[in-house]
Amino acid sequence: MKSEKSLPFAVGVRILSFVVLISSVFFAPWWFSFILYVSMLFLFENFYEGIFALLLIDLLYGIPEAKFYGFPLVSTLFAVIFYYFVSWLKRYLSFY
Amino acid sequence: MIYHRDKNKNFSRNIISLLVLVLVIVVGIYSKDSVARLGNSTQNSLALVSESKDNVSGFFASFWSAIHFKRSLSEENGRLKAEHVSFEALALERDRLVQENMELKEVLGRKTEKKSVLAAIIAKPNRSPYDTIVLDVGVDSGIENGDRVLTYGGTVVGEVMYTGDVTSKVELFSSPGKTTDGIIMGGNISVSLRGLGNGNFEAKLPRDVEVPIGAQVVSLGLNPFLIAIVGAVVNDPRDPFETILLTTPFNMQDLKLVEVLNS
């Protein structure tokens, strides 16, 4: 049972997680940011801000490359796909 | 007790998911310029973060060198001094040849002037799924799209794809799927290099063409620059073509500074 007191703490944890995710975009390899993002999808409900963090990867480093058929928003696309996939998966897991 | 799921809620959720997916794909395909403009406006933050990161890593580097064992340092110093002397001799020889080359071109009426800008790399290819590097120079330093990027004065690694005010994004020639035309020195064989990522290339040539290991592949044009060196030639008797595997003469991850050649 969640108490009223735990709400600011939960919000604080969520903000801190977002800051860590954003920092990983600047300092860590892309796969680390992606693993962090998927973990946070499981931890938090409606983690929309994670999609914006991965959008930052495309904006900072991305160009239309031949290996992605010239598509410049690869990280964002995978972020959105994983967002819905994890949301769907969570409905069938007993932990949630 | 049995809980029934709200089917209307599920339906609207699925519709929204589908719309968001379609939106991302449509924006990605039809609004590449807008994405690039948005990307350029976020580049300043990357330059800022890169500076602070350099300060932190500089502190740790000096701390480590302080506790490093003295004898191994002096041995390394001796080895590096010997290497330095040999490289100095090689550099002098190279300078003489470059000078001679320019004088010959001048005699033939093809004077060439090289204008370049020194740039620091603030993001390397492992930072993103894209095979790009981000430089700390942009439009403010006279960088334009299509400018070539050189390392160690004579190896060309890629070209500028997008320029922001203070940063620019460079697509590497070794980017997977990217093809670059070049010439194998010695035999003057034209070759089309296909990027494999992280400074590696492959090329296909008829099996009868002999390509020596270590041969240099240079770019086309009056002032050719080194692109890669032949590392291996793979032959299969059943295949009329041979596969040539090439690599840059340095590790991409070791690069810190590059030269941007104004076109």
Image (tube, coloured by chain):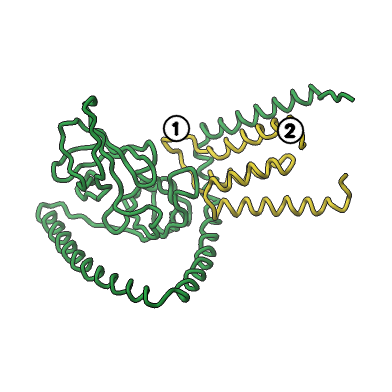
Chain colours: A yellow, B green
Q: Position of residue B100 (x, y in %)?
A: 12, 60
Asked whether the residues under marks 1 and 2 belong to the same chain, the reply is: yes
Pick whichever, B8 or B61, lies toward us.
Answer: B61
Q: Where is residue B15 in the image (x, y as percent from the top left)?
A: 69, 25
Q: Are marks 1 and 2 in contact (CB under 8 Å)?
A: no
Position of residue B59 in the picture relative to residue B101 (left or right)? right
Image-quadrant location for residue B260: bottom left
| Amino acid at dot 1 | Tyr
Position of residue B129 in the picture relative to residue B118 (left or right)? right
Q: Which of marks 1 and 2 is in front?
A: 2
Q: Where is residue B128 in the image (x, y as percent from the top left)?
A: 50, 46
Image-quadrant location for residue A46: top right
Please give the name of the residue rendered at 51% of the width and 60% of the height, measured from the top-left corner: B50
Pick whichever, B233 or B216, lies toward us.
Answer: B233
Q: For mark 1, name the chain.
A: A
- The residues bearing labels 1 and 2 have C-alpha atoms spaced at a distance of 36 Å
Residue B231, disc:
none
In this picture, is A4 found above or below B183? Answer: below
Please give the name of the residue rendered at 53% of the width and 67% of the height, measured from the top-left corner: B56
Position of residue A1 in the picture relative to residue A51 (left or right)? right
Secondary element type, mark 1 = loop
Please give the name of the residue rendered at 18% of the width and 61% of the height, measured from the top-left corner: B94
Secondary element type, mark 2 = loop
Q: Split into 4 quadrants, where in the image is the N terminus of chain A?
A: top right
| Amino acid at dot 2 | Leu
- Classify 10 Å Cα crowding around label 1: few (below 14), some (14-19), many (20 and above): few
Pick whichever, A17 or A42, lies toward us.
Answer: A42
Residue A69, disc:
1
Q: Name the residue under label 2.
A: A93
Position of residue B105 in the picture relative to residue B146 (left or right)? left
Q: Which of marks 1 and 2 is nearer the N terminus?
A: 1
